Amino acid sequence: MHTQQVSRPCAEEIVLAVSLELAMAKWKVALHDGRRDRPAVHTVTQPQAASRLQAVLSLIEQHRQKWALPASVRIVVSYEAGQDAFWIYRALQARGIECYVVDPASISVERQKRRAKTDRLDVIRLVINLRAWLHGELDRMRAIRVPSLQDETSRHLIRDRGQLQKEVLQHRDRMRKLLVTLGCWGEVDSRKFAVRLANGDVRCHDGTPLPLELQQRLLRECERLALAEQQLATLERARLESLPEFARERIDRLTRLSGIGAVGGSRLALELFWRQFSNRRQVGACVGLAPQPYDSGESQVDQGISKQGNRRVRALLIEMAWSWIRKHLTTTVVDGGENRHQSGAHHFRFDGHHCDR
């Protein structure tokens, strides 16, 4: 998806700005038309998502009539990105209401050691920032790009695969460490381990049988491990078949590049390249690889990368970069190999190229 084009209101145009502070138990709603000192703040507590959203729409209509705003008044809604993701955005857009999802880290807060923080204060600050942002004060907040529903749902496959891989490793590591407590250093990666365990062939360091409670716990771990491995194998078979055609085309183009395999290409295509980038700086900033210098007075410190954005893609790109270096560049280290600078950072020189890690 392309960058959202924000229509700036004219000086005489009236905009009904609405901000939402979301929580499971209740939502705070702030409404402001710019013609009064304070925004109106309400609380909606309906138990169901659809009814709660409808209550917000009713509040908007009530205040439009109460404040004598025209039926064609521009309504703009904003809320912070969080666990509710983008369903509110899509529901409002489907009703013809302009909506923006805000990066919470982009909203400035007071810097006192102790400051008041309530949902009411947060939603008031959000609606005030929204009005200022609409009038051109772009440093008040940042609106994030929202993926399409198809792009968002396509990510579940690759994320579930990563979670299952982690669970498989966790089960094996847990069983291995439980056995080590009794001096049993046997291999647990083999599929025959569960059979040997059930037959009593797995024993302590002195040849005595495992305690019954530990044996039963390990058998339960084996069952969970087998289920995770089965689900992982199913996902591997269906990884490409279940994706839409445009996603498979993205993956195919990425895997043509040296150093990018099928799994890495799938993750990049689904997690990152559902959106358009104009240059490499945008790519780096999106995944948190942009440098963060600190230069104030005589203090100059390189704080490293920002580490903002998608942590999964950031870790993958760093791993790919080092793999590419190891594969393509000459590993002959110039000037004595790895040099430790005064800052303590490791520095490599490969064929005249500098690479900090």
Image (cartoon, rainbow, N blue to C red):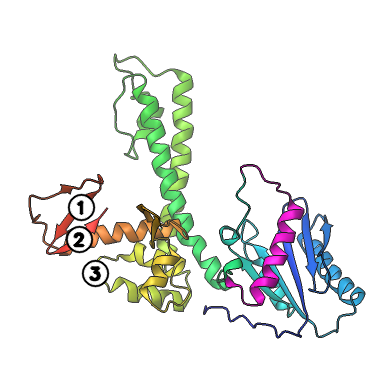
Find the distance from the CA under tag 3 to the CA under tag 2: 20 Å
Front residue of this view, candidates 231 and 117: 117
**Horizontal placement of 180 versus 345: left or right?**
right
Find the distance from the CA under tag 1 to the CA under tag 2: 7 Å
Q: Residue at x 55, y 67 (%)?
A: 152
Read off the residue under disc 2: 354
Q: Nearer the viewer, mark 3 or mark 1?
A: 1
Q: Residue at x 69, y 62 (%)?
A: 126
Read off the residue under disc 3: 258
Indicate which disc, 3 or 1, sits on the residue closer to the N terminus. Answer: 3
Indicate which disc, 1 or 2, sits on the residue closer to the N terminus. Answer: 1
Front residue of this view, candidates 57 and 203: 57
Neighbour tally class for label 2: few under 14, some 14-19, many 20 plus, Cα within 10 Å: few
Residue 320, how many percent across, how many down? Answer: 29, 61
Read off the residue under disc 1: 347
Label 1 element class:
strand
Residue type marked 3: Ser
Q: Are marks 1 and 2 in contact (CB under 8 Å)?
A: yes
Label 2 element class:
strand
Q: Which mark is residue 88?
A: none
Label 3 element class:
loop
